[in-house]
Structures are given as structure tokens and as C-alpha cells.
Image (cartoon, rainbow, N blue to C red):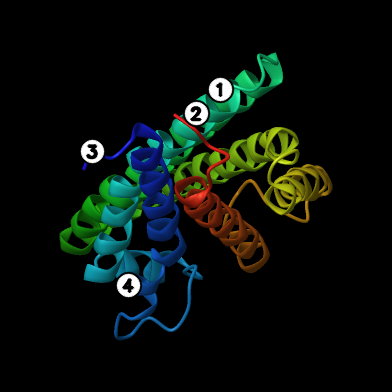
Amino acid sequence: MKISSKKIGAIALTLGAFLNMIRMIPIYLEVGITGYPPKDLSETILIAQTNGYYISHTMVYFATPLFLLGFYTLYQELKKRTSNKLLTLSFIVFFIGQLFYTIGVVLHGLVLPEMAHEYIVASVSYQNTMTPLFEVIHHMATSYGGLGFAFCLLSTGILGFYLRPKFKILGITAIALGILALLGYSTGTLAILLFKNFELTAGFITVLFVFYFATGITMYKSSEFND
């Protein structure tokens, strides 16, 4: 039996969200890792060389295209009911957010581990030269990642207004996420630099992925979404 494009998109959204929800687990399961984020340069270098760190970022490489496909499918389904430009803006903002997030993941998942390996085998004088660059890359990665999440949260808030007529709980949840994100980032309660208020910001972002996980399942099952 042929699977509709709507259901393929729903599966993609669900899987993309799920992979993002659980991506930190491999890092926490690593022996010797007592906490995350790393507190200093030595911990950053240690974590960046673990298998868990590699697995975690590989999960994101798979999750991102799935997440984008799923969100685009959701956008197309909602677009059938309205031609409002704000809905298109939501998709554009979401896409920009995922682009920033991807840059952050590449810097953290590919560049940083290579630098960590070079740092360990380097001479002391070369390590002293590398340290500022290492910290700059680390800072850039967390900044791009945090900015990406901020865009995705704000995009989700806009999306909520178009989900609410048919899916009240999902719509209200999305609007609430957008409003709380706007307030959080404007007051500094949530941090663009991810590791600044990591526990709160990461928890908030996890709620975002849980929301899209539930949305993907709803999109797959509900007859309100028609091809």
C-alpha cells in the first residue's frame, strides 16, 4: 500500500524530534563523564573525544533533514487552509533556525573533536597557541546552536495560531512556547549562548522537541490533515 506524502512527512517529523529528544543520552552514558556541559577546557577536550559525543552529533545529522521535511509537510498541510503570509514567515524563520543549529552542530561535532585530538598530541607551546582558537570555536558553536533554537521557538509560536483552530492543545502549547521564548530570551532567563543557563535552556528546548514529536504523531493519525 502506498504511503501518502503527509504520512511520510509525519514520520519524518516524529523521528527527527525523537532523535533530538534523546541525543544527550550517549554523552551521559560515557564512563568518566560526570556532568554536562563541560566546566572548563580540559573537560571539553575529554568529552569531545568520546564515542558518546560522536554518536550524539551523528544523531543530529540524521535528525535535521528529517525535522525539516516534517516541518515542511506540516507547513504545506496548514497552507491548504490559509494563504496568510505569517504562516510562510513561520517556515522561513524555522528554516533559518535549523541552518544556524546545523552550523553549531558541525562546529561542535566535527571541528571541535579534530581540534581536541590535535591539542592532546601537540607540544605545550602549540597548546598555548591553540587554546584561544579552541575557545572561540566552542563559543561560536554554542552561539549558533542557541540562536538556531531561538528562531525555532519563535517560529513555533507563530505556527501555533494556525494549529489552534483544529488542534487546540497543540496550538495553545505552540503559542505558549513562542511567548515564553520571547520573554525568556529578552530577559536573559534563556540564553542564546547555550551553556550559560544550560539546564533551563536545554529543558525548554526538550519541551520543543516533545511538542513536535506529539505533532508528528497527530499529523500521522488525524483525518484533519488530508492529502
In the image, is 25 to the left or to the right of 185? left
Vertical order, 146 against 121 (above or below): above
Which residue is depicted at the point 70% across and 33% down? 162
Q: Which residue carries the number 3 mark?
A: 2
In this orientation, which residue lies closer to the viewer: 54 or 64? 64
* Marks 4 and 3 in Cβ contact (< 8 Å): no
The CA span between labels 2 and 4 is: 27 Å
* Marks 2 and 3 in Cβ contact (< 8 Å): no
Earlier along the polypeptide chain: callout 2 or callout 3?
A: 3
Q: Nearer the viewer, mark 1 or mark 3?
A: 3
Name the secondary structure under disc 2: helix
Instruction: Say which amino acid is labelled 4.
Output: Pro
Instruction: Say which amino acid is labelled 2.
Output: Phe
Q: Position of residue 38 (x, y in %)?
A: 47, 69
The CA span between labels 4 and 3 is: 35 Å
In which quadrant will I find the N terminus? top left
Q: Residues within 10 Å of mark 1 (few under 14, many from 20)?
A: some
The CA span between labels 1 and 3 is: 30 Å
In the image, is 179 to the left or to the right of 14? right
Q: Which residue carries the number 4 mark?
A: 26
The CA span between labels 2 and 3 is: 29 Å
Q: Residues within 10 Å of mark 3 (few under 14, many from 20)?
A: few
Name the secondary structure under disc 1: helix
Name the secondary structure under disc 4: helix
Instruction: Say which amino acid is labelled 1.
Output: Ile
Q: Residue 92 carries which label?
A: 1
Instruction: Say which amino acid is labelled 3.
Output: Lys
